[in-house]
Image (spheres, rainbow, N blue to C red):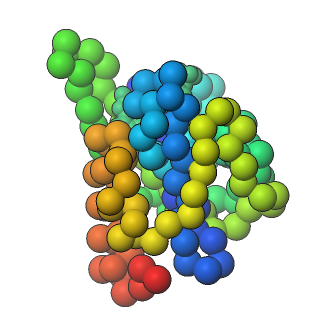
Amino acid sequence: MRVVAGALQRQDGLWLMHKRPLHKQHGGLWEFPGGKAEVYENQNEALIRELHEELGIKAVLDSHSSIAEARHASPTGGEKIVIALYTCRYWVGEPQALEGGSIGWFTPDEINKLDKPPLDVVLAEKLFEELADKGLQRR
Ligand SMILES: Nc1nc2c([nH]c(=O)n2[C@H]2C[C@H](O)[C@@H](COP(=O)(O)OP(=O)(O)OP(=O)(O)O)O2)c(=O)[nH]1
């Protein structure tokens, strides 16, 4: 299963996280917004669609901003999940939680402390490590 996610950074340096609705898998945990890519979509198309459905924005992605991917095999030997995370600093519209969860804006240190699904823990670590390596200050 291909999953795409966006790391949206606002002008003030804070990053958006989405709290999943309680009734869903990983309900109440904080994730990078995104979702499953359909078979006919490339990753950019899928992420632009998901960010529109979930947050109501039109995102402008940098095609080279793919940052991290993580794999997760289910205990029953089920499907592998690959999540590709893209950074995004430009969008049109004000992000809102349109699917029953909520959103918040956080520093990397705050994101590290949020309760997250397992793959989002890996994505956050890789994202902030990579930005630190590039000398792009966290905030
Ligand atoms: N973000 C994230 N997703 C995960 C993890 N582990 C895991 O199985 N997933 C699955 C849950 C979902 O099936 C999928 C994420 O896609 P999604 O956000 O569109 O899922 P959803 O349940 O909201 O979508 P839907 O099936 O209702 O259409 O990845 C994880 O650690 N982080």
Q: Which residue is drawn at 46% across and 57% down?
A: 66
Tell which of 124 and 41 is nearer to you. Answer: 124
Q: How many marks?
A: 0
Tell which of 34 and 20 is nearer to you. Answer: 20
Q: Residue at x 76, y 51 (%)?
A: 57
In the image, residue 92 sits, relative to residue 77, either above or below, namely below
Q: Does 26 sit left or right of 80 as displayed?
A: right
Give coordinates of residue 38: x percent, y percent: 59, 25
Give coordinates of residue 94: x percent, y percent: 78, 58
> In the rendered image, is residue 28 in sight?
yes
- Quadrant for residue 25, please give it: top left
Give coordinates of residue 55: x percent, y percent: 70, 46
In the image, residue 51 sits, relative to residue 9, either above or below, namely above
> In the rendered image, is residue 2 in sight?
no
Tell which of 38 and 27 is nearer to you. Answer: 27
Q: Residue at x 56, y 64 (%)?
A: 105
Quadrant (top left/top right/bottom left/bottom right) for the N terminus: top left
Give coordinates of residue 127: x percent, y percent: 37, 64
Q: Does 113 sit left or right of 16 as displayed?
A: left
Residue sticking out furthest to the right: 93
Q: Which residue is drawn at 35% across and 70% down?
A: 109
